[in-house]
Amino acid sequence: MTDDGNTSMNQQLGTPDVTVVTGAGGWLGTGLVAAFLSDKHEYQRSGRLRLLVRDPADAVALRAASDRVEVVVGDISRADTALDLFRDLHDVDAVDVIHAAGIIHPNKMADFDAVNHQGTEHILRAAENAGVRRMVHVSSNSPFGTNADVADTFGHDEPFHPYFGYGRSKMDAELRVQAAVDRGLNVVMVRPPWFYGPHQPARQTTFFTMVRTGKFPVLGGGNQRRSMVFIDNLVEGIVRAELTPTAPGLAWWIADERPYTVSEIVETVGRALTDEGYDVQPNRLKLPNVVGDIAERIDAIFQRVDKYNQQFHVLGEMNKTIAVDISAAQRDLGYSPDVSLYAGMRRSIQWCHEQGIKL
Amino acid sequence: MTATNEWAASHECEVLIIGSGAGGATTAAILAEAGHDVLIIEEGPWVDQGEVVPFSLEQMDRQYRSGGVTVALGVPSIAYTEGRCAGGGTEVNSGLYRRPPEQAIARWKSEYKIDDFDANGLLSICEEVEAQLTVQTVPGEHTRASEILRDGAAALGWQHDESPRWMSYPEGGRAVDGKRQSMTRTYLPRAFAAGARMLTEHRLVGLVMSGGGATGARLSATSTGVDQPVTITFKSVFVCGGAIQTPAILQRAGFRHRVGRTLAVHPTVKLAARFDENVNTPDDVPVFQVKEFAPGISFGGSASHPGLVALSLTDNWRDFGAAVTAWPELAIYYAAITSQGRGWVQAIPGVRDPIVTYRLTKRDRALLGQGLARLALLMLEAGAGEVYPSFKQAPLVRNRADLAKMTAAFAATKASVMTVHLCSTAPMGENHKRTATDSFGKVHGATNVWVNDAALLPDAPGVNPQASVMAIAIRNARRFADERAG
């Protein structure tokens, strides 16, 4: 996968007549749709939005948001859902697809493959049949595992080394994307690491509470490096990947400007909470690295017997470095993540406060 | 004056130098030119450059210790090689020249408290060395195996460059026309011109100690096939036997403080890659190196004559063995890491070779896997149709999806881990807790025993170490001469 000489100097495409968004009820999908519909947002667009959600409750809220919105309720692990989603789009001039549906913390292991892998294949096939203009597949860092050394950084292109069940399903999805490219579909990929921001699910709220109460598990010295991405930065990366003409099949890391150390993340979140008026306890939960090793092993054993335990999975990953280099996105897409960790965290905390979520 | 392997019962000299490699040969030249009476002893034979085919099995027999490969015990065991001939490792290595990184110099100075140790001084010695050894890049055509590394790295946008070598070339010469400017062609003749003497095929049995001083050395002359005893008396002795032999010699002489406790290496894992054209140049190694992930991980090319191709396929011979018949289409490449692990060298009474152990850390083992996977990706990008990773139960890699199978199957304990860069078994500096010698190589507690070879490097520099070894040896030899000058 090499860059065919496309540069950020390319003229951006206009926004499409119809934008299809899968996973529109999810965290990222909500952020994307909010940006597309808001008059004030840099990335608001005028065309129709065709949104796929799984939960009928989400459909009601989204339909109410704008008369440009059409909502399909379904499950991408079923082939007929994809057909419903692309119904009557053949005759539309320009249709773009942002495939943001995925499952990260499932009830059972088989869901990883059904949703992330088979579901992606269903969307790819339906998009091909509909003759879409461009598709952006939202991948992940997990097909590439973790960095073996704290000083190592993932380059633009890396060998697959999937991290457990989620990583395998996201890798299989990427392979399906490459196969679709070979068949002629114009699809590219973005690979966000751990993201944060408004509309976050409960597990991320727990993260704030752990930091506020001084109980965030810092493993080893806390010098592991993590790339993160604020949701608005990620929206920018996705839109730029959609609208910047490049060769199909390319993939970009979309993250904040630079990786952070775990200590820096905990310290920054603590500062953001304090500046938002919360009473923050000093972090005392410093654990030896071996705790992460044990959690990782338990996670592996659980996954082998088709069980998934979110706590062990997250703790097992906490002593790892996952650091990525975004220079290819900067070069090819003109991507420039403006929001810093501190500013992004403050906005996330404000959002929690507005929602009445107790931290 | 040249080297001789002839026996005489006894010799006398002012300065005895044990070993004639990158450390010993430079020490000999500097001290002889400063007017000292120098005698060099070397366990191996004198073999002129060009007498044997580079990187061949014959070379392994004649110029390496133990016929080529020795093993450091551990999980996994790490195979290593040591030159054992006049000129030592400089006669047989890849000839790739890298200045000591300034980062490493600064780290050594501060952590080991080395006096008068600065980048400018060392780099100006490097300039002298570069002139003496005609260090240069290939003026003409590269080998195909070399271009593969360059092209694969370029396709991935990975930083890479050509390592210069200590070679001389005819005008516009190709890579394979290079003549290695090893110690037998450079510093040893310089030492002889200044009056130094050299005994080859003379193996040190032990130093004769009296208190903290060495008064003499007992040797065996081996050229006739029968060991004949030799004694040498001297005023001062420089131990330059390399990172394995030097600590063993010191331990047998009673020096134990931080001796042989901190062996550092660059562990490497390998693969063979097959292309749809002839890429194998049996008597040369690639000169391009990939530094995108340096200093953690570096990639380069290895010697690839048919015997070594076969060796690289043996870890999964059942599946890979048939490929050996296509050896002209195969070349071997390595991924090297900077290791957090350390090893031990321990002399055992009554046994000629010391026991060497090395322990890779968990991070080292993971980094070897990451390095091998990235190297395999580079090979695919360079157009390899098939990649054969060197570890047990390795899958054949033909495409990116196979890389996931490879990373899932990899464990460093299943890999043929090896190294050619051994150092740090008698580290130098004033930080007594971490060092075996002072800032100029004089062994702590000794009155007249110095170390002047790769053993002094406080840790592995992350690049081919010969330039670092030579620059430090020349610096220390000058200090010795200056302190004794009028």
Image: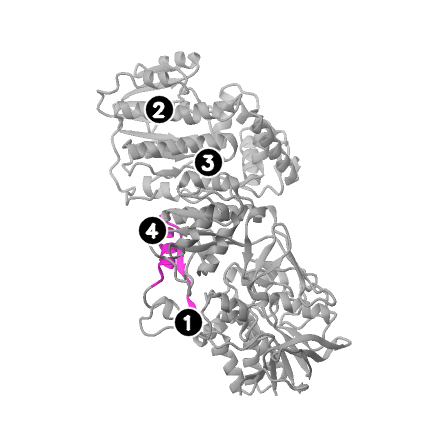
Q: Secondary structure at mark 2?
A: helix
Q: Secondary structure at mark 3?
A: helix
x and y, in percent, of residue B61 in the image = 54, 68
Outermost residue toward the right? B211
- Disc 4 marks which amino acid? Asp
Neighbours of disc 3 within 10 Å: few (<14), some (14-19), many (20+): many
The answer for how far apart the CA atoms under marks 2 and 4 are is 37 Å
The numbered mark 2 sits on a residue in which chain?
Answer: A
Mark 4 or 3, closer to the camera = 4
The numbered mark 1 sits on a residue in which chain?
Answer: B
Asked whether the beta carbons under mark 4 and mark 1 sit within 8 Å of each other, the answer is: no
The answer for how far apart the CA atoms under marks 2 and 1 are is 59 Å
A25 vs A141: above or below: above
Where is mark 3, residue-wise? A143
Where is mark 1, residue-wise? B167
- Disc 3 marks which amino acid? Pro
Q: Is residue B210 magenta?
A: no
Where is mark 4, residue-wise? B276
Q: Is residue B356 left or right of residue A6?
A: right
Quarter of the figure with residue A278: top right
- Disc 1 marks which amino acid? Met
Mark 3 or mark 2: whose residue is earlier in sequence: 2
The residue stretch that appears in magenta:
B142-167
B269 vs A237: above or below: below
